[in-house]
Amino acid sequence: MIYEPMTVFTDLLIAGFAVYFSVELNRKFGVSLMNTTWHWVWVFRFLAVGSLLGAISHGVGPYFPQGVRDWIWKGTTLSIGLVSFFFILAGFYRAFPYAMVQWLRWLPLLALLAYSVVILRDPRFINVVKFYAPSLILVLLIMIYSAWGQSAPGAGKIAIGIVISFMAAGVQVSGWDLHRNFNHNDLYHIVQIVGMTYIYRGALFLTDYGT
């Protein structure tokens, strides 16, 4: 028996869309894949990994020993940290010159290392939020600046996608269930897919700084 089948289904939907988006970005740009786009590819790849682990956790996790369940959850939360890491770098390569990013990239790397240490010791979701939410806000500000300050095509769509992602998080936190077989987690996943789609469509047009 699969626990929480609808949550598993919507988690797998996110993973499927994330894989598709990463493959399409690779296919469309090929050997001309820019730093910005390359990092968006990895955002979607780790989003797929985290969603797949989430599906396992919600679907068959209760059958596993506690230790195994803990590591599945830690793998999910570490994947979210990597999503945030590549998210920030994609924004940096869009907004700042390459030479500057070579220095700036150490900041999200150090933050990721600190986050990983915290998560391995205390994998509560509140610790995920403390890292993920500021990352989204930072990239949102970068995309707003890129859209209106640099007239960067695609940046506006990514900004919209991030706002939708915050709306999705609000749905998840609210605990509002549409139906006993379609709870707040399931609705969160569906809204998140909409946000992902906007981010993907923006990433198709986003370029490195100065290109």
Image: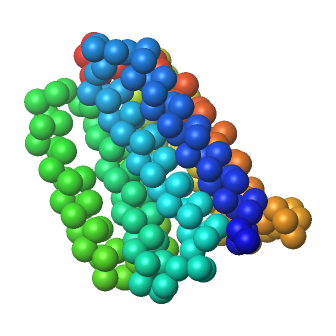
Here the colouring is: rainbow
- Left of 196 or right of it: where is 100? left
Q: Residue at x 56, y 64 (%)?
A: 56
Residue 195 or residue 77, whichever sits in front: 77
Would you place residue 72 above or below residue 32 in this image?
below
Question: Residue 197: percent from the left, percent from the top?
Answer: 60, 33
* Residue 151 visible in the picture: no
- In-image side of 41 versus 191 (left or right): left
Q: Residue at x 24, y 61 (%)?
A: 111
- Residue 21 visible? The answer is yes
Hey, which quadrant is residue 80 in on the image? bottom left
Horizontal and vertical percent position of residue 189: 66, 53
User: Farthest residue in the right direction?
Assistant: 179
- The correct choice, above or below, for 17 with respect to 124 in the image is above
Determine whether 120 is above or below 208 in the image. Answer: below
At x 41%, y 48%, the residue is 46
Q: How many marks?
A: 0
Classify residue 68 by image quadrant.
bottom left
Percent of width and height locating residue 145: 41, 32
The residue sitting at 36% across, 27% down in the picture is 37
Quadrant containing the N terminus in the rendered view? bottom right
Quadrant where the image shows the C terminus: top left
- Give residue 6's quadrant in the image: bottom right
Q: Could you tell me residue 4's position as x and y percent?
A: 72, 68
